[in-house]
Amino acid sequence: MFRGRNLLIATKHEKEKVIAPLLEEALGVSCVVASQFDTDMLGTFTGEVEREADPVTTARKKCEMALELHGFDLAVASEGSFGPHPVLGFMPADQEILLLLDKKNSLEIVARELSIETNFAGEAVSTEEQLMAFAVDAKFPSHALVLRPTRSSATAITKGITDKAQLLEVFRQLQQQHELVYVETDMRAMYNPTRMSVIRQATEKLLVKVNSFCPACHTPGFGVTSVKQGLPCAGCGFPTHSIKSEILTCLKCDYTSERMYPNNKKVEDPAYCQLCNP
């Protein structure tokens, strides 16, 4: 279905460095970067352009707009989101969405990777000592930083700082007018090797899904679309919120199947039971 075709990668942040080699080897495609398409028009991490849609919709829009601009029929795009982990709320997390859109075969395949491997952070600082302490924790200079007057400032933003001298110079300039300066991690892929690694993991998940075929019609992309909770407690047998089964659905013919105990667990630890440990 994909071998020998050109695949457009909708990115301006060098994500092709990790996406292209994996897709070319596994699918037999030739990857081309959508050089004429500015993905920032759909949202930026620093807030000059707010992302209006959810990550999947935004990734789909990236593919559709890039395909129309370049005249291709096969594209892939990724979209990242950063914030508290949905379960481990005290820890920052990176969720990467990777979407493959095949207009020729009316096919859309989505993969997700949620990782706590991220340097995502931001802090208001008033001294160079505080600034450099943040920089060390943020893996600077291999990971770039952003400086601006306040967390919500949409102007006077300096991105992609990877040099200590520049970092201090911009900080001192901002401090002439602002008592506090906001420093944050630059989450654009080409400035954040940790995020690039998570994008690679999402690409690997996408390939697993591409190579999963519907038992009924053999369309690729057969995968999990929902889950059922209710894994019984090992102590009292009460249904917990833990996953008991996964529902897999075909993207074409709507064939579904249920996979029981996807994590090879048939009972849950009483520590996660609402009765045993309310």
Image: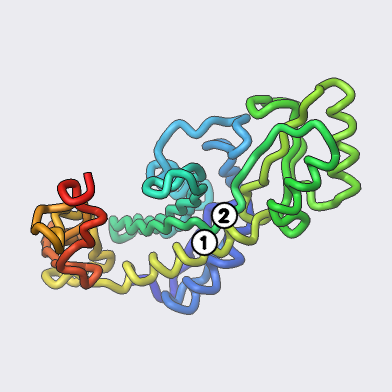
Tag in front: 2 or 1: 2
Residue 55 location, x and y as percent? 42, 43
**Circle 2 residue:** 118
Dot placed on the residue nearer the N-terminal end, 2 or 1: 2
Instruction: Give the residue at x 49% y 50%.
Output: 93
Query: Which residue type carries mark 2?
Result: Thr
**Which of the numbered marks, if any, corresponds to residue 146?**
none
Residue 183 location, x and y as percent? 72, 38
Residues under numbered marks 2 and 1 in contact, where contact means CB atoms less than 8 Å apart: yes
**Circle 1 residue:** 198
On screen, 60 above or below 247? above
The secondary structure type at the circle numbered 2 is: loop
Name the residue nearer the viewer: 137 or 166: 137
Q: Note whether residue 103 is visible.
A: yes
Query: Which residue type carries mark 1?
Result: Val
In the picture provided, is 262 more to the left or to the right than 107?
left
Q: Note whether residue 253 is visible.
A: no
